[in-house]
Image: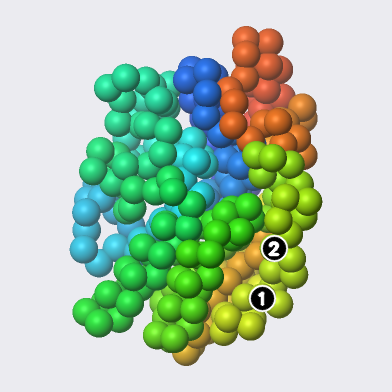
Amino acid sequence: MTLEEKKQLLITACKVRIGIIESTYSASSGHPGGSLSAADFLTYLYFKELNIDPNNPAWSDRDRFVLSKGHAAPALYAVLAHRGFFPVKDLRTLRHTGSYLQGHPNMNETPGVDMSTGSLGQGVSAASGMALAAKYMHKDCRIYALLGDGEIQEGEVWEAFMFAHHYKLDNFCIAIDNNKLQIDGNIADVMSPYPIPDKLRAFGFAVREIDGHNFEQIESALNEARATKGVPFAIIMDTIKGKGVSYMENQASWHGKGPNDKEYEQAMDELKAKLSELEAM
């Protein structure tokens, strides 16, 4: 990755974070914490990795992405908007009556959404099925899924992992957003999923652990995923819940609520200052 490419990714990720704050503020609800922690990975995925066409969202040979942690829809919507699937201004309609941007992704309403998600565990299960279907149809596309670390407390997740290994789905890459917090607090206290890498390896995955806010490491892991043959690939991302907004960082209380007027102003001031700094680089 060149310095200019990295700069553009950093700028885009900052704009995505602004979109997350705009949308959850406008909705007076939503899930900003886990959206902000996933913003960098989703930015890289949609602007560098995925073979997609915003002008033809239903293109049959496209790569697929499934947001298994569907409550992080504000991040997905912000990325899709900046990638050109729909107008950025529509982010302000999040969760409004009649809006196509509801609290969880809807593949029947929102351009660019490949699977309706929300019930934790079901997204990665659908994604593994997509990967098997692509194999049977001799499609060259790849399937990606993003899970939350709290989500992997669900048993259905591990059934999907077992399925992916059994069918040798080397066109399938999962990423786990390990921001260490869920709605009830620290995931290690609620129901520890640790050690995550060891468990994924036991289920037959090739595994890479990275800093989920480092674009070079994200790029390297995705390159390794594409080069891996015979087994599915897992990226375990060490992230910060609420990344980019000082008062939201590492706070479980920001799992599922929108900012008020004062909180919105502070978040926007911080993010716009960061954006100006990046653009001046």
Quick one: which residue is furthest to the top in this view? 261
Q: Residue 11 appears in which quarter of the rendering?
A: top right
The residue tagged 1 is: 199
Describe residue 29's horizontal placement relative to residue 172 as left or right. right
Describe residue 216's horizontal placement relative to residue 140 as left or right. right
Q: Residue at x 78, y 51 (%)?
A: 189
Rendered-image quadrant of the N terminus: bottom right
- Tell me whether circle 2 and circle 1 mark residues in contact (CB < 8 Å): yes
In front here: 280 or 147?
A: 147
In the rendered view, how is the structure colored?
rainbow
Establish if 220 lies above or below 35. Answer: below
Q: How far apart are the two marked residues, 2 and 1, measured between alpha carbons?
A: 9 Å
Circle 2: is it few (<14), some (14-19), or many (20+) Cα within 10 Å? some
Amino acid type of the residue tagged 1 in the rendering:
Lys
Q: Residue at x 73, y 59 (%)?
A: 192
Establish if 139 lies above or below 257. Answer: below
In front here: 111 or 50?
A: 111
Q: Is residue 225 visible?
A: no
Q: Residue at x 37, y 20 (%)?
A: 96
Describe residue 177's horizontal placement relative to residue 78 as left or right. right
Amino acid type of the residue tagged 2 in the rendering:
Pro
